[in-house]
Amino acid sequence: MRERGFFIVAGLMESALAGKPGIPLAILYSTTGSYSTIGREALDGALMALAEVNADPAFGFKLVPEFGDPAGVSETYAAMAQERLKHRGCRHILGGITSWSRKDMIPVVERHNALLWYAFLYEGYEANDHVLYLGACPNQHIVPLFDYVVPRFGASPFLVGANYLWGWEINRIARELVLSAGGKVAGERCLPLGSTEVDHLIDEIRATRPSFVLCNLLGPSCYAFLTAYAELGREDPAFAPERRPVVSCNLTEADLAEIGPAASGQLSTSIYFASLATPENRSFRARAAARHDPTRSPDASFASTYGAVHVLAAAIRDAGTDDPAAVRTIVMSRRFEAPFGPLTFDPRTNHAAHRPHLARARADGGFDIIESAAEPVQPDPYLMQVSRQVPAAASPGNLRSRMRVVP
């Protein structure tokens, strides 16, 4: 009876949806400003998905983008979101890269009973009914990353972060993981977003000689730091990637294209790398190559926003309406296909389950995946389980492994 009732309601909603010439979708990414490389990748992924959805008659509607470029200014995201929700008929926002921008938009989407589709990894400790978290949370990025690097390189890292919420919180989690493993943080420094003044960081790292470096910088700050660290490695072989690597949760192929060979050998974790060897990713890459430069590798930003648009479109189609509550119900009740694998959501937290991967950067701008989780990791944004799983020792094999070696 429940399924029959649903289909009756869905049929009524479909007729209402069919009368709309298009469904407006706010897309807010900073394609200019201090992290514009990531913003351009995110926008390109969304545009590719929009083109596919709007060309497919099976959807029965078109998504009409309402673009905005906040230029990396977090306060501008809220103003642009308000304008699109209040005056342009949008009920869904795809956007935000930094946690500042996300948190500034949340009160706006709450007031308008809308949904924010946030497609990026973040620091966790949040769960809002008006946000769908499509990116990785800490137990899907920093925890498996440290599971790998601490036993192999030691438990005395140097933490380098962007001077805002992401950098502060990821460094805090890193400190807790290191202390739980019986180690000690060798040093911690933050840079303002966009700053390229990294010489003092390199000098301190040279002096403290940490076991590895965790880098949470964004954009030009990250590029300047990795370039300087590569020079340090040439001057002192003790800082070569195979001995003291720089590890990251947010280094992608788009970043490697900006940095060049200086990033070679460094480690990153992500839910998506272009080198992922699955039929779904091969098909996705072929379509991306046909739309863009064939030599360009889509990164996690591109793949995540692409997946977000397809999930939204499928949920609207199946709900028969773009009503946020109805769309959210559909999203929480079924599985979706994405370039990085099957995508399901936890209705308690609005977060997606993801399969994390660890990869090593190549000089040619790609990544070699060296380990992958055997299956998707259920989201744990508040790290309720991790605190009970991390043992107090840092020898190889003692940290709880969430990954397996890629054959």
Image (spheres, rainbow, N blue to C red):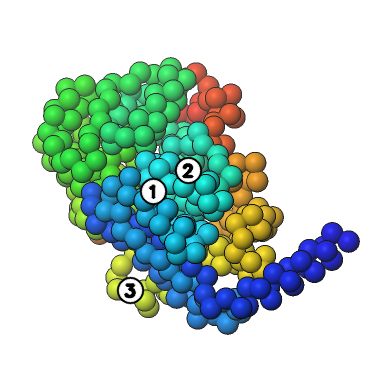
Instruction: Tell me where residue 175 sits by quadrant.
Output: top left
Residue wearing tag 2: 107
Q: Which mark is residue 78?
A: 1
Under circle 1, the secondary element is: helix
Label 1 crowding class (10 Å Cα cut-off): few <14, some 14-19, many 20+? Answer: many
Under circle 3, the secondary element is: loop
Which one is earlier in the sequence, the residue at label 3 or at label 2?
Answer: 2
Residue wearing tag 3: 292
- For the residues labelled 1 and 3, say whether their Cβ atoms are less than 8 Å apart: no
- For the residues labelled 2 and 1, say whether their Cβ atoms are less than 8 Å apart: yes
Under circle 2, the secondary element is: helix
Residue found at the far right of this picture: 1
- For the residues labelled 3 and 2, say whether their Cβ atoms are less than 8 Å apart: no
Q: CA distance from mark 2 to mark 1?
A: 8 Å
Q: Residue at x 25, y 31 (%)?
A: 190
- Dot 2 amino acid type: Pro
